Image (cartoon, helix red, strand yellow):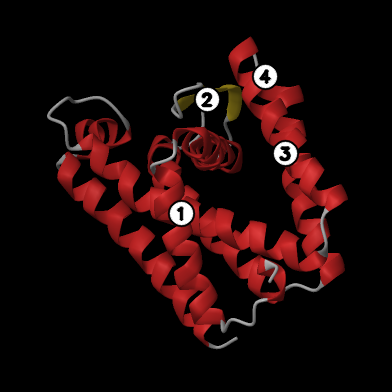
Amino acid sequence: MAFTSIALSGSQRFVLFVVLCVVAYYIPVLNIPLLWVEVFFHEISHGIAALLSGGSIVSIHLLFNGSGYCVTQGGNAFLIGFSGYAGSALWGLMIYLVSECLSRKASTYAVGLLVILLGLTLILWVRDLLTLLVIATLIFALGFILFNSRYKFINHVLGFLGVFVMLDAVRSPLVLLDGVSIGDGAALANSYGMPEFFWVLVWFLISLMCIYIAWRMSSKS
C-alpha cells in the first residue's frame, strides 16, 4: 500500500515523522542534505534578524558537512546572535503546521515560496561555489517534488522537513557545550554576561516547545 494512502491520525503521522527523522539522521546520504535545510534556516534567521533591525546581509555560507555561517553588517547584535537557533526551530514549526493545515494549492505555494527564498538567497548573498552548489541542490530537489508529486506527498515532505528541522534545532545548540568558546552562545555570553550554558538551555527549551506545539496541533487533526 502506498504511503500516501495509509490512513493515519495526525499524532500517528507526527510520531512516524519523528522515527523517520531519527533513522535518516544516521544515514549519511540523507543526513547531509537534511542538515543543509536546517542550517539554511539557521543562517537565514540570522540574516532576517539583521535586516529587521536595520542591518544588512553580506553573505551566507553553507558547507558540505552540514555547517554554515552568515556574515552581517550593522543591526542589533543580540537579535542577530539569538535568532539562529531560535529561528530554525520556529521555521521547523511553521513548515510542519503548513503541512497539517493547508489545501493542495496552498501547500504547493508553500513549497514554491521555499524555492523562491532559496533562489533569492542564491542571487543576493551567495559568494562561494560550495554554497552555490548546496543551495542549487536544494532548489532542484524541492522543484522536482513540486512538479512531480501529488498534494498528499507534498504535505508529507513538508511535514517530514518541519519535524527534522525542529529535532535538529534541539540537538544543534548542545554541540556548543564543548568547552570551546566559539559560536553564537559564546558570543552572547561575552556580550551580555549570562554563561553560554544559559543560552543553550533557552534555545533547547524553545525547540522543545516548538515540538510540543507541533505534536499538540497534530493530535487535533
- The residue located at (57%, 37%) in the rendering is 44
Callouts 3 and 2 close, C-beta under 8 Å: no
Mark with earlier residue (4, 2): 2
Disc 4 vs disc 2: which is toward the camera? 4
- Give the residue type at disc 1: Cys
Q: Secondary structure at mark 3?
A: helix
**Quadrant of residue 97 in the image?**
bottom right
Q: CA distance from mark 2 to mark 1?
A: 31 Å
Mark with earlier residue (2, 1): 1
Density class for disc 4 (Cα within 10 Å; few <14, some 14-19, many ≥20) is some
Where residue 208 sits: x, y (%)?
34, 64
Callouts 1 and 4 close, C-beta under 8 Å: no
Q: CA distance from mark 4 to mark 2?
A: 18 Å
All told, the count of numbered labels is 4
Q: Secondary structure at mark 2?
A: strand
Q: Which mark is residue 141?
A: 3
Mark with earlier residue (3, 2): 2
Q: Which mark is residue 132?
A: 4
Q: CA distance from mark 1 to mark 3?
A: 18 Å
Q: Secondary structure at mark 4?
A: helix
Report the side of 118 relative to 96 (left or right).
Answer: right
- The residue located at (44%, 28%) in the rendering is 67
What residue did someone put label 1 on? Answer: 21
Mark with earlier residue (1, 3): 1
- Give the residue type at disc 3: Ala
Where residue 189 sits: x, y (%)?
21, 36
- The residue located at (47%, 38%) in the rendering is 31
